[in-house]
Image (spheres, grey):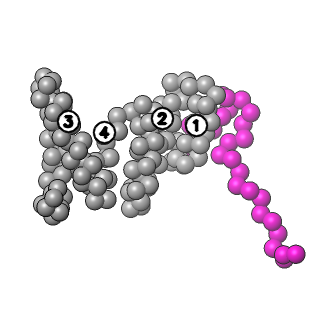
């Protein structure tokens, strides 16, 4: 028998019993920058009822968590979190810092593939915000291409 006492398991991020209390707890976690707990709270709420405000909270929690991970140089984890955000919250994957994280992780081919798709779509569409997005991606990609493998 061990001399060490048994530690209780990790508490769930919320123990409220009503959706309103759970939502208040989730919002509190989000406002305090506890994004991991906020994600868990909002995911549980959205499973019960996909209210727009809860989905928006979940999106903000995913974004905050991804940015926090990237700030700690955990870009692979940030990329995965950003992909979850896009899938679960129905947000565009390529908005925000996603492309820069891919480039920093050496995933230049994925960014080039997306850029070629956007270029093809932009040539069929009227001028506008698509051009701005393409120009921004090209500017981010240019330094990485200078030192990339010749095959790229």
Q: Which residue is mark 4?
A: 95
Q: Residue furthest right?
A: 1
Q: Which mark is residue 134?
A: none
Q: Are marks 1 and 3 in contact (CB under 8 Å)?
A: no
Judge by depth and name the residue closer to the eye, 89 or 123: 123
> Mark 3 against mark 4, which lies toward the viewer?
3
Q: With 106 as the anchor, is 13 left or right in this view? A: right
Q: Are marks 4 and 1 in contact (CB under 8 Å)?
A: no
Location of residue 82 in the rendering, given as x and y in whole percent from the top left corner: 41, 44
Q: CA distance from mark 1 to mark 2?
A: 9 Å
Q: Residue furthest front?
A: 151
Of label 1 and label 2, which has the lower sequence position? 1
The region drawn magenta spans 1-29
Q: Which residue is mark 3?
A: 118
Classed neighbour count for the residue bearing mark 1: other residues with Cα under 10 Å, few (<14), some (14–19), many (≥20): many
Of label 4 and label 1, which has the lower sequence position? 1
Q: With 129 as the anchor, is 33 left or right in this view? A: right
Q: CA distance from mark 1 to mark 3?
A: 32 Å
Of label 4 and label 2, which has the lower sequence position? 2
Location of residue 34 in the rendering, given as x and y in whole percent from the top left corner: 54, 49
Judge by depth and name the residue closer to the eye, 124 or 49: 124
* Residue under the point 44% across and 55% down: 77
> Mark 2 against mark 3, which lies toward the viewer?
3
Q: Which mark is residue 88?
A: 2
Is residue 88 visible in the rendered structure shown here?
yes
Location of residue 59 in the rendering, given as x and y in whole percent from the top left corner: 46, 36
* Residue under the point 41% across and 52% down: 78
Of label 1 and label 3, which has the lower sequence position? 1
């Amino acid at each position: 028998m061990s001399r060490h006492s048994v530690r209780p398991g990790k508490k769930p991020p919320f123990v409220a019993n009503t959706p309103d209390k759970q939502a208040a707890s989730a919002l509190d976690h989000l406002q305090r920058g506890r994004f991991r707990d906020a994600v868990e709270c909002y995911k549980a709420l959205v499973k019960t009822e996909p209210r727009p405000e809860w989905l928006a909270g979940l999106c903000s929690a995913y974004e905050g968590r991804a940015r926090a991970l990237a700030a700690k140089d955990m870009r692979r984890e940030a990329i995965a979190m950003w992909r979850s955000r896009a899938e679960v919250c129905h947000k565009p994957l390529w908005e925000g810092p996603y492309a820069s994280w891919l480039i920093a992780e050496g995933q230049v081919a994925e960014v080039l593939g997306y850029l070629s798709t956007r270029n093809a779509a932009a040539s069929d569409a009227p001028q506008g915000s698509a051009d701005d997005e393409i120009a921004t991606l090209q500017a981010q990609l240019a330094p990485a291409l200078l030192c990339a493998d010749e095959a790229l």
